[in-house]
Image: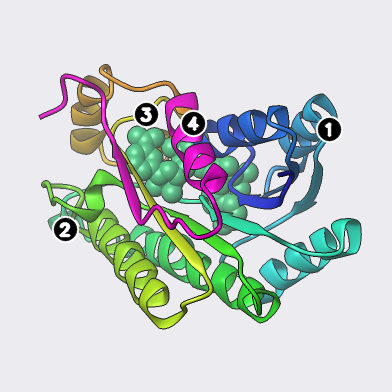
Amino acid sequence: MSKVILISGASSGIGEATARILAKAGHKVFLGARREDRLKALSSEIGAGYAVLDVTSRESFQSFVDAAVAEHGHVDVLVNNAGVMPLSLMDSLKVDEWDRMVDVNIKGVLNGIAAVLPLFTGGGHVVNVASIGAHLVTPTAAVYCATKYAVWALSEGLRQERDDLRVTVISPGVTESELADTITEDHAASFMAEYRKNALPASAIGDAIAYAISQPETVDVNEIVVRPVADR
Ligand SMILES: NC(=O)c1ccc[n+]([C@@H]2O[C@H](COP(=O)([O-])OP(=O)(O)OC[C@H]3O[C@@H](n4cnc5c(N)ncnc54)[C@H](OP(=O)(O)O)[C@@H]3O)[C@@H](O)[C@H]2O)c1
């Protein structure tokens, strides 16, 4: 069945790959991110709609959802995928980067949930992209992991509160994308450059998202963790 699927952070990496896979499967995909040039090019390539979206703004997320409803009449699925990962040691006190991770990775997900919940009266599906960082913590990733633990908790709480809603957490391991480009601390950047050599293609995460969406309406895939084979 063709669904109306909204994807935040669709201008690169996992969001872009997911959009390609879902559009190819015949869904009506609606793309959101800040870089309009990227959205425009992708939307004309795959036949999707798009609107500029800053997930940190409640108003921007509402306008994004409104634009999708204006185009398609309703929303079936929201993929809360936008995220940033400027890793650093806590001692470095990069407090602006802490704020940005909280704003994008937690508040961005909440803003998305707030914008679609009123539409999801008789069903609906929220897919939140967390991380293996929702299950384990490593040095330089304290704040990032905290935001992803929060995404996991929000998803589980929402799932328990609503009998008519499907809620899925997707927890990727290292995946090819632009995510590490936001790191400004040398120590974290050089560690990540090595760590990220063993990475999944972004399509591997897109396939997992497509799998969760494609299940029967009575089936809620609660979480999928996807790692490269050799990841410990
Ligand atoms: N790649 C990995 O190894 C990995 C592992 C675990 C989890 N994840 C998660 O996967 C998700 C996607 O990341 P990615 O790996 O695909 O990285 P990416 O290539 O950097 O993509 C991140 C996306 O988020 C968007 N974004 C950032 N800030 C935004 C904002 N304020 N408003 C709207 N969109 C915003 C970016 O678009 P604009 O800059 O155009 O706004 C971009 O499309 C993230 O939640 C990330 O934490 C990734």
Say which quadrant the C terminus sits in.
top left
Question: Could you tell me which secondary element the residue under label 1 belongs to?
Answer: loop
Give the mark toward the camera: 2 or 1. 1
Q: Over which residues does the magenta segment extend?
A: 203-232
Q: What residue do we see at 70% from left, 27% from top?
A: 24
Say if 101 sits above or below 196 in the image. below
Question: Could you tell me which secondary element the residue under label 4 belongs to?
Answer: helix
Residue 93 falls left or right of residue 109: left
Q: What residue do we see at 23% from left, 49% from top?
A: 133
Q: Amino acid at mark 3?
A: Thr
Question: Could you tell me which secondary element the residue under label 2 belongs to?
Answer: helix
Instruction: Work out whether mark 4 precedes mark 3 in sequence or the reverse, and give the earlier one.
Output: 3
Say if 69 sits above or below 231 in the image. below
Indicate yes or no whether the magenta region holds residue 67.
no
Residue at label 3?
A: 175
Cα distance in 3D space between marks 3 and 1:
25 Å
Residue at label 2?
A: 90
Residue 101 falls left or right of residue 29: left
Question: Could you tell me which secondary element the residue under label 3 belongs to?
Answer: loop
Mark 1 residue crowding within 10 angstroms, few (<14) / some (14–19) / many (20+): some
Given residues 33 and 222, the one toward you in this image is 222
| The quarter of the displayed image where residue 192 is located | top left
Say if 86 sits above or below 120 in the image. above
Instruction: Work out whether mark 1 precedes mark 4 in sequence or the reverse, and give the earlier one.
Output: 1
| The quarter of the displayed image where residue 54 is located | bottom right
Cα distance in 3D space between marks 2 and 4:
35 Å
Give the mark toward the camera: 4 or 3. 4
Residue at label 1?
A: 47
Q: Position of residue 225 (x, y in %)?
A: 28, 41
Q: Amino acid at mark 2?
A: Met
Cα distance in 3D space between marks 1 and 4:
19 Å
Residue at label 4?
A: 207
